[in-house]
Amino acid sequence: MVVGDVTTGTEVLVIGAGPGGYVAAIRAAQKGLDTTLVEKDAYGGACLNRGCIPSKALITGSGLAHEAGNAEFMGVHADPAVDMGKMVEWKDGVVDGLTSGVEKLCKANGVNLVAGTASFTGENTVRVAHGGEGQGSETLSFEHAVVATGSRPVQIPGFDFAEDHVWSSAEALDAETVPDRLGVVGGGYIGMELATTYAKLGADVTVVEMLDDILDPYEDDVKRIVRKRAEELGVEFHFGEGASEWSEAPDGGYLLHTETEAGDESTYGVDRILVAVGRQPVTDGLDPGVAGIETDDRGFVETDDRTRTAVEHIHAVGDVAGDPMLAHAASNEGIVAAEVIAGEPAALDRQAVPAAVFTDPEIGTVGMTEADAEDAGFDPVVGQMPFNASGRAMTTGHTEGFVRIVADEEAGFVLGAQIVGPEASELIAEVALAIEMGATLEDVAATVHTHPTLAEAVMEAAENARGQAIHTLNR
């Protein structure tokens, strides 16, 4: 690439190297298109550097320590000491290995890499400002573009992430010491994952949430199991309260002030405050309007089922394009965008996109709930297998939760599943595949599953829906 005033051309320009962008760039290059990927920060985006991967590393580390210290019922007696600095160092090593791997994959597939911040200057051009003094900028022209600039944590009034004691999820994942008292604002998936992680590391955790329960999109019986387990870990919940401000406390810590809709006020003593109330699109500096790209009232880029924006040759994928804001969905969108650009008949299909929450226990969902199926005009049949009837779950000491599978009663086609329990994030993949391939309950039930495994619970749930379960009572 030439730095300066010379304009360099490329067939496909991808802006942002997160799980949507780098996947789009690699697939476009695999299709024989000259592809340029612009990244201003780090390869892998928020997911790899400040989200999915580092959070799961800390979840694993904290879980291991907690398991070791609470296994007396198995005859295991231990009092593990957690070196938080070392755990964060290990987490960073995992992240560094993956980010360098993404860069190598891009280069190996022939993607041109450009470091800098891109801003649209027209429908077919961007200006890329290079970081560092004296680095200058360059103009890139393109035939097609993919916007994949991601999202960042929402900041609420009065809680500036620049304050040392106010954390976004990024700061919570980099902390080298565990606060004695952690206040968590928001009971969504990020707040709950980090609340349980820090509770296992020894913090006294208080969660405040404006709604009347945690994990708003999920069904009540799913949420109940996760909330009960969090309470067993010592997490304290206060629902119907919103964070209003913070103040310094006489003891040297801080006070987290909350208020209800009725005006009732409460205060909670904390040492750190984690704000986890959602994420917002990153488009500042991009100037999408200059290229004719339309955004909604929250700033998300509007796209169709082929990832195209209002400007047909410009696509948007990942968090910047709105829900579902999931890394694997972003990667799927990136593949679709690249294949559409290559002239192939690709399009998004949302019916089998799974979601997971890495709480204790985990949640995994895909497709329709029973209520969704009824609303869609199906006559659903539901099967369920509790983990307390699973031999493998019993041997792990984790028997909370269940597998629930939803199908169309007449045809037997699998429509969805909700799993809460051990390894739910892994188990949900089987049902996602079943939905994708148009499998029936009989297909799932007739598939011989290894014994003893947690996956047998999926088979038993399918059998239960057919009234033929062996290892649980039929409905």
Image (cartoon, rainbow, N blue to C red):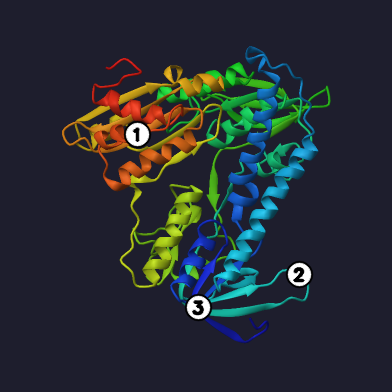
Residue for point 64% across, 85% down: 5
Q: Secondary structure at mark 2?
A: loop
Read off the residue under disc 1: 448
User: For this view, does 61 lie left or right of residue 345?
Assistant: right
Q: Residues within 10 Å of mark 3 (few under 14, many from 20)?
A: some
User: For this view, does 9 lie left or right of residue 59?
Assistant: left
Total marks placed? 3
Q: Earlier in the sequence, mark 1 or mark 3?
A: 3
Q: Earlier in the sequence, mark 2 or mark 3?
A: 3
Residue for point 33% across, 30% down: 405
From this viewpoint, is residue 299 visible? no
Q: List x then y, in percent, for residue 135.
A: 74, 75
Query: Which image quadrant is residue 80 in?
Result: top right
In the rendered image of this protein, does residue 143 appear above or below residue 56?
A: below
In the rendered image of this protein, does residue 284 appear above or below residue 384?
A: below
Which one is nearer the viewer's eye here, 383 or 252?
A: 383
Give the amino acid type for the residue marked by disc 3 in the picture: Asp
Give the amino acid type for the residue marked by disc 1 in the picture: Val
Q: Please tell me the numbered disc located at residue 349.
A: none
In the rendered image of this protein, does residue 61 appear above or below residue 90?
A: above
Give the amino acid type for the residue marked by disc 2 in the picture: Gly
Which one is nearer the viewer's eye here, 470 or 399?
A: 470
Q: Please tell me the numbered disc located at residue 34.
A: 3
Q: Earlier in the sequence, mark 1 or mark 2?
A: 2
- Label 1 vs label 2: CA separation? 58 Å
Query: Which image quadrant is residue 253 in?
Result: top right
Residue for point 60% across, 70% down: 107
Q: Residues within 10 Å of mark 2 (few under 14, many from 20)?
A: few
Read off the residue under disc 2: 132
User: For this view, does 441 lie left or right of residue 272?
Assistant: left
